[in-house]
Image (cartoon, helix red, strand yellow):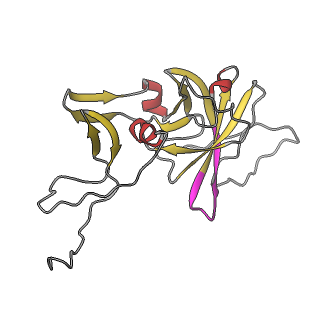
């Protein structure tokens, strides 16, 4: 529901205040590092939402502001020490809020980070164990992906844009569908559309 947040401060007592539309960027005395996550929309993420690393609660959302002429939201994500050393420049962050359902060959798969993330919204991140990229510095910018699948797809070391032409129906095929090789996911469909072939006039 609706609520009013307050940040304690030092100074003279007062009874009248002017409220801000957006929460301020908070600071903390706890050792750690603050990173910037860019996304098109906040969704269920709010001030104080937890940040998870492999199921462990390792940080919190300190606030956000609008950037680039309000084209995206910049989330200030604080990761406590020593877990901030696991954030490298190629780490992947994704929205872990809510519950994700996926129907595949093995049946229905349910993904949920934790009950806390379900109630308060949350963010998860992970880093490849074999990474040789340096540890990310404070205020390093990362994209925030919509879910874990989108983050893993974006983490491929080499990306190739390819086009396949089908003369028959592609009913049921839509952006986001898996591209597989020998049963393993190697990519996803980014767009589906019609192309006029002048050679056969159709």
**Residue most toward the front?**
199
Quadrant holding the C terminus: bottom left
Query: Which one is nearer the viewer's eye here, 191 or 111?
Result: 191
Q: Is residue 121 magenta?
A: no
Residue 179 lies, in percent from the top left, at 29, 44
Residue 90 lies, in percent from the top left, at 59, 37
Which range is magenta? Answer: 62-73
Q: Is residue 13 left or right of residue 89?
A: right
Query: Which one is nearer the viewer's eye here, 107 or 162?
Result: 162
Note whether 200 is above or below 185 in the view shown. Answer: below
User: Quarter of the image holding residue 21?
Assistant: bottom right
Note whether 96 is above or below 141 in the view shown. Answer: above
| Residue at (14, 76) in percent of width and height | 200
Q: Is residue 113 left or right of residue 62?
A: left
| Residue at (55, 43) in percent of width and height | 3
Residue 80 lies, in percent from the top left, at 68, 25
């Amino acid at each position: 529901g609706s609520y009013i947040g307050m940040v304690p401060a030092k100074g003279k007592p007062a009874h009248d205040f002017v409220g801000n539309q957006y929460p301020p960027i908070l600071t903390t005395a706890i050792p750690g590092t603050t990173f910037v996550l860019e996304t098109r929309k906040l969704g269920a993420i709010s001030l104080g939402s937890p940040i998870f690393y492999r199921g462990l609660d390792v940080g919190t959302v300190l606030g956000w502001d609008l950037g680039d002429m309000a084209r995206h939201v910049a989330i200030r994500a604080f990761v406590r020490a020593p877990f901030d050393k696991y954030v490298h420049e190629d780490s992947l962050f994704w929205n872990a809020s809510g519950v994700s359902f996926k129907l595949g060959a093995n049946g229905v798969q349910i993904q949920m980070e934790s009950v806390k993330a379900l109630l308060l919204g949350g963010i998860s991140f992970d880093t490849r164990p074999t990474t040789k990229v340096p540890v990310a510095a404070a205020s390093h910018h990362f994209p925030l992906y919509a879910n874990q699948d989108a983050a893993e797809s974006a983490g491929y070391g080499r990306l190739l844009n390819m086009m396949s032409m089908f003369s028959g129906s592609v009913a049921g095929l839509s952006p986001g569908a898996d591209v597989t090789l020998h049963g393993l996911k190697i990519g996803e469909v980014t767009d589906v559309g019609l192309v006029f072939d002048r050679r056969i006039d159709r």
